[in-house]
Image (cartoon, grey):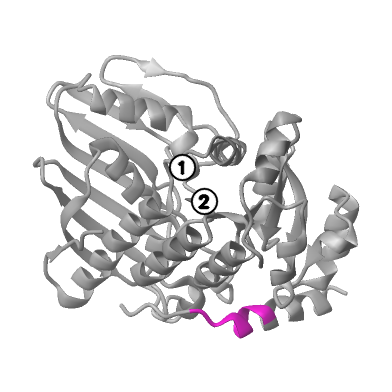
Amino acid sequence: MQRLNANRREFLSTTTSAALAAGLATGGFFSETARASSNRKLGVALVGLGNLSTNQIAPALAKTKHCQLAAIVTGTPAKEKTWSEKYGVKQDHIYNYERFDKIASDDTVDLVYVVLPNSMHHEFTIRAAKAGKHVLCEKPMANTSQECREMIAACQAAQRMLAIGYRCQFEPHHLKMMELAKGKSFGDIRMIEAGFGFKIGDPTQWRLKRELAGGGALMDVGIYALQACRGITGEEPIAITAQETKTDAKKFAEVDESITWLMQFASGTQAYCSTSYNFNGLNRVQAFGSDGYIKLDPAFSYSGIRMETSKEKIDLGQVDHFAAELDDFAQCILEKRPSKVSGEEGLKDLLAIEAIYRSIDQRKTIAVDKV
């Protein structure tokens, strides 16, 4: 399956039409240091005000210890007034996509959170870095591994930090699962089974357009299963065998509907994974060790994650994943330390995803490219 690069005009025209129908200077770390010494929060600019920003990220920002909403960037004029009134964002801190680069002179913004269709991550991460802002980019990092490399290089050149929105890396049950696996609490991990999917609705949405999404269920939610397996093993897959099933050729004409894949790791561990846009209920990860198992079910929801092992059930409480990831990134910026969900982490996922698509296309086992 060939995945394409950005078509920003299509997305902008779509969002603008919806709105009408409804009615870089590179800087140093000095500003962050000043904020830390005065206990001020780092200012966040949200780029893209879709469902995720509206229902998850903006509410999470209100819960953070080290961040606050400082600016918004949207291609939908009708959203400007709504967000301004709800969050007190003043007009001089509201940007559209064309004038985004002026954010370079906005001293209230320390970091940019890119929450756009996948094909736009590359462009706006690079533009944010050139504007002198640190970047938190939603997953998947980009549509291709080459775009990932360019994003990493741009942030390095601008001396800005880059992190990817892998929220589960800050969720206590996921962290505990990785800890138990690393400590061999249930022996050597022999097999992992992981899957995440849902029945997607609106057939006209951008997630079903290859040029904007890069792929379907795999890019959107299958990446969670991939991430979990990499985290549990602490390894990168060396070979992948995958196959795709498509039952609705019209709705899923441009992207994948359902994919299963087998990953092989150098240690001998294997992982059987699945993802789909055609049914609900697939939301789990289970690691089978030589002396027992560890399971999360549900595993990837925003809340309600449950954990059990072959010995006991474990309740570590619930956290706001987005608040946790934002606070961690803010602390990384303030303390000048690398993020554990760096751009390199996002690149590794794309290398595995590309191997999955190549395996489907070529109908054979594919070796995963190295970073």
Instruction: Using residue 269 as the reference point, say whether residue 204 is left or right of it.
Output: right
**Magenta part of the chain:** 6-12
Query: Which element is circle 2 on?
Result: loop
Horizontal and vertical percent for residue 48?
67, 63
Closer to the observer: label 1 or label 2?
A: 2
The residue sitting at 39% across, 48% down in the picture is 282
- Residue 128 appearing in the image: yes
Report the number of numbered marks.
Answer: 2
**Residue labelled with disc 1:** 339
Callouts 1 and 2 close, C-beta under 8 Å: yes
Instruction: From this view, report whether residue 358 is shown above or below residue 94.
Output: below
Instruction: From this view, report whether residue 323 is shown above or below residue 352.
Output: above
The residue sitting at 22% across, 43% down in the picture is 235
Residue 357 has which mark? none
Query: Residue 197 falls in which quadrant of the image?
Result: bottom left
**Residue labelled with disc 2:** 161
The prevailing secondary structure element of the residues shown in magenta is: helix
Cα–Cα span, label 1 and label 2? 8 Å
Q: Mark 2 is on which residue type?
A: Met
Q: In which quadrant will I find the N terminus?
A: bottom left
The one of 151 and 249 positioned closer to us in this rendering: 151
The one of 318 and 156 positioned closer to us in this rendering: 156
